[in-house]
Image (spheres, rainbow, N blue to C red):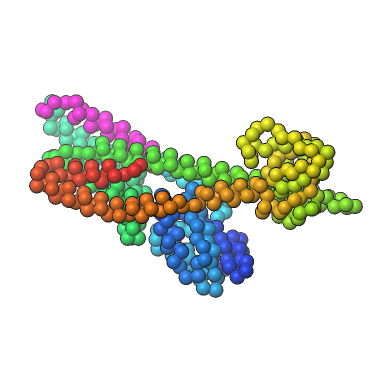
Amino acid sequence: MYDDPEVAARFVRTESGMSEATLLVDGLRCGACSWLLEQALGQAPGIVDCSVNLAAERASLRWDPSQTRLSELIDTAERFGFALQPFDASQREKQLRDAARTRLRRLFVAGIGMMQVMMYAFPAYIAAEGDIEPAYAALMRWASLLLTLPVVLYSAAPIFRGAWTEWQRRSPGMDTPVAIGIGAAFAASVWATVTAQGEVWFDTVTMFVFLLLGARHLEWLARLRANRAIDTLAAAAPQSVLKLVEGAPPQTIAAARLRPGERFLVGTGEPVAVDAALVCPRGSFDLSLLTGESRPVNYAVGDRVPGGAINLGAPAELAALAGQADSTLSTIARLASRAAAARPALITFTETVARGFTTGLLALAAVVWLVWHQIAPDAAWSIAIAVLVVSCPC
């Protein structure tokens, strides 16, 4: 479908024999995911440049269409567990709302489950040995098991899917030890409930899932706010301007077609499309989007007014000094987007270490279980699970 010229024309730009596209990425959860996607696409034939922006959840691709097709690049990403689709600003807000609702539903189920399971676990915390009759203790364990099921099967589903994807990629990340820890604690608790022997950790499982999902939701909101700040800059530039032509009525043209030296009119409350020199005697402009300063700035004839400034006075006549792509606003938006997509050397190093850390952590947990199985078999599972769970940075 994406190789159809009519479909591709909506989001693929071709210039000097090279094609470019910005695609939404589904499946990004951390910096390691963006690194993996960049590596996977960067090694594809014909790819010239690949940049993945974790905050915006977008991938910017540049490739040689004579060597590869966009559908092949999308298939490559899918093999690594990522779904690519064209960026559609009109659909983006709906996708974000749907994602937020799904996240909150999972968090709500985990929170309700945690509180109810803790209600059944609390008597065992404060009761002395023998205070609770075995029948009541078994009843509370079975109730905790039933309440933990939706937390593990629904709320924690993204964690298990992430771990499975990491194993398919042969690149274990932080979801792997967390999923093993949750699964092992739940399985051991189920066994203890069925056999009426040993300890149960239903309260630990539900609480851990709730706190983990809460932390990840806050991280997602922070990335979303950063991305929206960049989008606000990009959307502030007007798409059209009122060009002034001597001896002819004003013409509405695309702002991108405005050339240096051409004059245009900016109405009251409208943003300046490009960096321009003020032609009229004076003008007052709001530069808060560019500088953060809320006070109006007064300009005199001939002064340079930056693109993105908002006209607070009467309609002002200006003469363009540069194209829209080179305006102050476009430059700031471009630098902000580049900074969000940039990968400092320290981040790359830590992600490389993290992959080895996860593998070593799994080996360490296995060794800990073997050692404690010889020392105190009853405590082996809980200690090994603690090693896995405590490694989670969330």
Report the side of 194 relative to 271 (left or right).
left
Residue at 69% over, 46% down: 307
Percent x, y of residue 250? 83, 50
What main secondary structure does the magenta stretch of the protein show?
A: helix
Q: Which residues are magenta?
A: 106-130
Q: How many marks?
A: 0
Report the side of 159 relative to 285 (left or right).
left
> Considering depth in this image, is 341 or 250 the residue closer to the camera?
341
Report the side of 350 relative to 388 (left or right).
right
Magenta residue check for 109 = yes
Report the side of 354 relative to 66 (left or right).
left
User: Can see residue 28?
Assistant: no
> Considering depth in this image, is 13 or 140 the residue closer to the camera?
13
**Farthest bottom residue in view:** 66
Magenta residue check for 268 = no
Residue 338 higher or lower than 103, as above or below: below
Residue 333 higher or lower than 16, as above or below: above
- Give the quarter of the figure containing the C terminus: top left
Residue at 16% over, 32% down: 137
Give the image quarter of residue 289. Answer: top right
Residue at 13% over, 26% down: 128
Residue at 19% over, 39% down: 200
> Considering depth in this image, is 214 or 172 the residue closer to the camera?
172
Percent x, y of residue 383? 19, 42
Percent x, y of residue 152? 30, 44
User: Can see residue 321?
Assistant: yes
Percent x, y of residue 107? 38, 39
